[in-house]
Amino acid sequence: MTGLWMFACVAALMVITGLPAWSVLIGVAGLFTLFGVAFDLISFSIYNAMPARLLGLLESDILQALPLYVFLGVLLNRLPLAQALFASGSRLLAPVGAARPLAGLGLCVLLSPMNGSVGASVAMLSRTLLPRLDAAGVAPQRAAALVCVASVLGIVIPPSMVLILLGDAMMRAHSEALNVTQLAGRIINTQNSENSLCGMGFGMMLSGARCIYFAKQLDFMVLGIDHFINTYNFIRCSRDPKSLGSFTILALVCDQGLQGPQSSFNSFGDFCSIARIPCYSVTNNQDAARVIGTELVAPGFRMIGLSSRLFKTEFLDLPLVHTAGDGSVFQYTEGGDATIACFNFSLPHGRALQQALAAKGRQASLFSVNYVPQPDWNPIRDSVEKTGKLIVFDDSKSVHLPAYRLLDEVAQAGRPFRRWTVTRGADVDFGMSTDEFRVDIGALVSQVLA
């Protein structure tokens, strides 16, 4: 939301004042910074790192090229170099019927990389090239189309500012990933070709390699479902997965709703239920440490998910009471008054209920449940035997929820108990809106204590 306000202020000030874009951007950023510090929305201590950060940027050989490219673009625009290049190109290509458009295209490709974006290239080339094409008798429609096409091509043709920044980001991501995993390996950035990439992952696993596929969105993995089922089943028919290499898919679950209909799929356990593979929803430090430490490069195939809806909240730091050997259950608190089981990415809501009950003098056992083909739910069943109350949270948008399976198994295992099931229900928004899993904790506390 803050970014939208900043964008609106930049647009309004540029229209009202007519100041250069760079001065408006710096001014708006400075004003919002002062506002955040004044109202304690931003910690002032974070700015202590600015000098070191600036020095680090200045020491980067790649980033030092950016102001030079900008300077070169200004020279080409202000000096008669552009006119000379256009005239020379027109004479050189005179035997060709489309000499002037081709010369203009070459000039566009030369100038566009200096601007950094398609929009900036279109604006600059409209000033630089359109008058020359018009004077050469090129039709306005063809001239405008030529500028637009060349602006797009110029961004992707080296050396361009966009490619320089992208290269720096990719180098930094590669180094950070190696430092985090402490593993020597190769990191490959690829296009969206999920079916092929899943097949490659299984192929690398068969060869004994350790492969991690970072997927941008969980719903993209639907394109690779054939490999999850057929390919992996063929592998399991002939080979013991524990004797092979490792293939892990780490998927970002776009469940905040802002991507529109394509982000409506957040049922992480559905994939694992279909393929009968372990699936781990990481929501806190304890989960992350255990899953990454023991499952990330373990032999076989599994999926690990992160919720983008939870990115705006602090990562939970919970004490760990018990962990099932297969990672299907994590227990964070022990209590004799209620049992709380959280599926998918609903642990923050279960934690809020546990804290609300604690404020009323009631202690609850809090569990996080992952999908594993043969889960060890004995800790939850034992807790329900003691408390007689089970509250289940599941924020999945699926119809067939694993939470219902837990309720059924607990019901068959022992004495009667009171139950509350908190799910999304039938009314699921598949459009472009903020997708919140809303829970009335106060009303739920009153029901549990009644």
Image (spheres, rainbow, N blue to C red):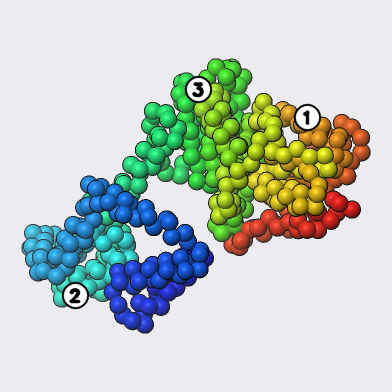
Q: Amino acid at mark 1?
A: Asn
Q: Amino acid at mark 3?
A: Gly
Up the image or down, 13 lies above or below 378; here it is below
Residue holding disc 1: 378
Residue holding disc 3: 245
The CA distance from mark 2 to mark 1 is 78 Å
Image coordinates of residue 166 in percent, x first then y, are 33, 49
Residue holding disc 2: 131
State which mark lies toward you, 3 or 1.
Answer: 1
Tell me which numbered mark, 3 or 2, is placed earlier along the sequence.
Answer: 2
Q: Amino acid at mark 2?
A: Pro
Q: Name the one closer to the observer, 103 or 260.
A: 260
Q: Are marks 3 and 1 in contact (CB under 8 Å)?
A: no
Up the image or down, 123 lies above or below 252; here it is below
The CA distance from mark 3 to mark 2 is 62 Å
> Can residue 371 be seen at all in this image of the molecule?
no
**Residue at image location 47% in from the left, 59% down from the top:** 43
Where on the picture, by quarter, is residue 81?
bottom left
Mark 1 packing: few (<14 Cα in 10 Å), some, or many (20+)?
A: few
Where on the picture, by quarter, is residue 84?
bottom left
Tell me which numbered mark, 2 or 1, is placed earlier along the sequence.
Answer: 2
Left or right of 22 in this view: 299: right
Q: Name the one closer to the observer, 37 or 86.
A: 37
Mark 3 packing: few (<14 Cα in 10 Å), some, or many (20+)?
A: many
Mark 2 packing: few (<14 Cα in 10 Å), some, or many (20+)?
A: some
**Residue at image location 66% in from the left, 27% down from the top:** 326
Image coordinates of residue 286 in percent, x first then y, are 60, 37
Image coordinates of residue 417 in percent, x first then y, are 89, 41
Q: Secondary structure at mark 2?
A: helix
